[in-house]
Amino acid sequence: MHKYTKTYTVILDDMDVRKHRLRPISAVMYLQDTFARYCATQRMAAYDLLQKGQIWVISEIHMDFVDNLPFWSEDLKVELWFSEISKLKVYADFNLYYNDKLVAKGNSLWIILNATTKRPVKADEMAAKFEVCADQALGPHTKMVLPEFTAPYTQITHTNNLSDIDFNKHVNNKSYINLAEMTAPTEFMQNHTLKSLHVRFNRETFLGDTLQCTTYKTAEPKTYAHIIEKNGTSVCDIVTVWREQKENVRIVDYDLPIKSER
């Protein structure tokens, strides 16, 4: 049951300026980078697939945050494994650690598409090259379901620019999550910490497209639905669940490994 690990050092750009720790969105990007590195070990990374006229797309991400994320300059270890490879779907589950303590866990759903037709390609090659580990970080894999939501709480409009574009020439997953964060209530976020993040990517968008992100309160406490639309059609649905931040938590609760390198 093989699990792939990669360790990252938190840099200033990845730090939440309000809480001085790794931003949850950066944790998501480390997860995706680890996925790419694992795939590259068997020549199944994005640039390998592109030579075959195929692309990787991520369909869903589910992540629970169980403890404080690391501070600037600390290390975050990502442990990732393929928990299920079916005819068309590849599930990658993961655990995130710092100082050997579990701080987040979750799963992600990936699909290989034909780059021209955008139709799914069988995952036979993945199944042949990678071992499946039956461990499931969040239990059985289920489809994301949006909670019932009420009237719009906040809303912004964004036109995709070059900084939003990824390797496949469509909008990067990070940009959608950034939009959701921008519409989240600021005062609420200052006093709360993200408990879980659920993302469903529905459609591609491209350079110059105009997106509208609307955040809604839901019937569930401390839970928000963030709906990102293009021309009235949802391209990405995000659900964030929050918990109250502990009082009197020190910004730094351990010694920082600040050393000069020669």
Image: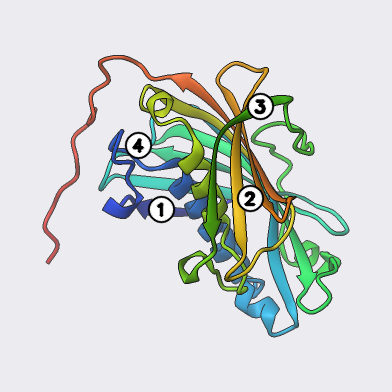
Task: Tell me which numbered mark, 1 or 3, is placed earlier along the sequence.
Answer: 1
Tell me the mark number nearer the camera, choosing from 4 and 3: 3
Looking at the picture, the colour scheme in use is rainbow
Query: To which residue does mark 4 refer?
Result: 99
Tell me the mark number nearer the camera, choosing from 1 and 3: 3
Task: Tell me which numbered mark, 4 or 3, is placed earlier along the sequence.
Answer: 4
> Which quadrant, please, contains the C terminus?
bottom left
Q: CA distance from mark 4 to mark 2?
A: 20 Å
The answer to whether residue 62 is above or below residue 39 is above
Q: Is residue 196 left or right of residue 200?
A: left
Across and down, in percent, residue 73 comes to 25, 48
Q: Residues within 10 Å of mark 1 (few under 14, many from 20)?
A: some
Number of labels in the image equals 4
Q: Which quadrant would residue 230 be assigned to in this image?
A: bottom right
Front residue of 234/194: it is 234
Q: Residue at x 41, y 53 (%)?
A: 7
Residue 181 seen by the camera: yes
Q: Which mark is residue 151?
A: 3
Q: CA distance from mark 1 to mark 2?
A: 15 Å
Local SS, label 2: strand
Query: To which residue does mark 1 refer?
Result: 7
Q: What is the three-letter code of the residue carrying label 4? A: Asn
